[in-house]
Amino acid sequence: MGKVIACVNEKGGVAKTTTVKNVAAGFALRGKKVLVVDLDPSFNLTKSLGMGNKGINGSICDILDRSIAYEDIPEGYGIHHQEEGIDIVTSSEKLREYENKLFLAPQREIVLRRYMETIREKYDYIFIDCLAGLGILVVNALFCADSLIIPLAPQFLSVEAMQNLYTNIAMIRKQNGTNVKPEVLGTVFTMVRTNTNNDKNIMEWVKDTYSQGANFFKVYIPSLVKYSESDLDGHSIYGYEPNSPAAMIYSELVNEIFERLGENAEPKAGENVRRS
């Protein structure tokens, strides 16, 4: 049975999509069968994997419609294959309508989970790229996730959003018990400016303040232009420049995630890995 990992932070612009794309690609390189689900109406994950033209038919919207109606979903429906060995459920702007659609649906919190239960056994890992905030779409992701990865930019608003996320997850768990089970697999600092001490100081303060529960990864992700270039290229950083320092950094993060999941794989980390 595959594990579902949601990438979530209530604040936007913290590299959730970049993290999902490159971690998922790193898992695929290590022989894992991986699916990514774009649960964001901006559909940046869809576009950054070169699948922008696949988001009209058979997207997450069509899957949610069928699940809301309790219709059978044919095997493989809405799943597209990306050339780096990643499967993807694409998104589109139409997903903006689904906050209201889901809110009015019966058993609204588990619409996505009903679909996930039909495909989990076909994958080793399923990654969900969540939109910002904590609306009903993100709540659906929480109800089907086994664990969470929290990207965190070293900025006040990003840290505040992380704190709000912890509070809201605890509240949802209290109201719904074992139906909401994800624990924080790890928090990764992203978009770190290495040319200033300000970001380093914020990172140290955050680690001291939130030492319990956040499970900070040792590796942090610096702000590098190669990541945005790979988005435009429609590939992960491994498909764009596999031997670059930018790729080596994500490779080391994947190694850390593998360790926490109890996985064994041949390390593919390179040199010049930034550590906090």
Image (cartoon, grey):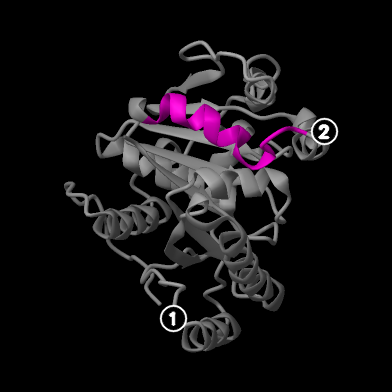
The residue where tag 2 is placed is: 97
Q: Is residue 126 above or below residue 134?
A: above
The residue where tag 1 is placed is: 212
180, 1: nearer the viewer: 180
Magenta part of the chain: 105-120
Calculate the distance from the C-alpha at mark 2 to the C-alpha at mark 1: 37 Å
* Badge 1: residue crowd in 10 Å (few <14, some 14–19, many ≥20): few
Quadrant position of residue 175: bottom right
Q: Viewed as shown, does residue 173 lie left or right of 100?
A: left
Residue at x-position 38% and y-position 56%: 245
250, 165: nearer the viewer: 165
- Specify the amino acid type for callout 1: Gln
Residue 183 pos. (x, y %): 44, 61
Q: Is residue 232 visible?
A: no
Q: Earlier in the sequence, mark 2 or mark 1?
A: 2
Q: Is residue 133 visible?
A: yes
Q: Quadrant of the C terminus?
A: bottom left
60, 114: nearer the viewer: 114
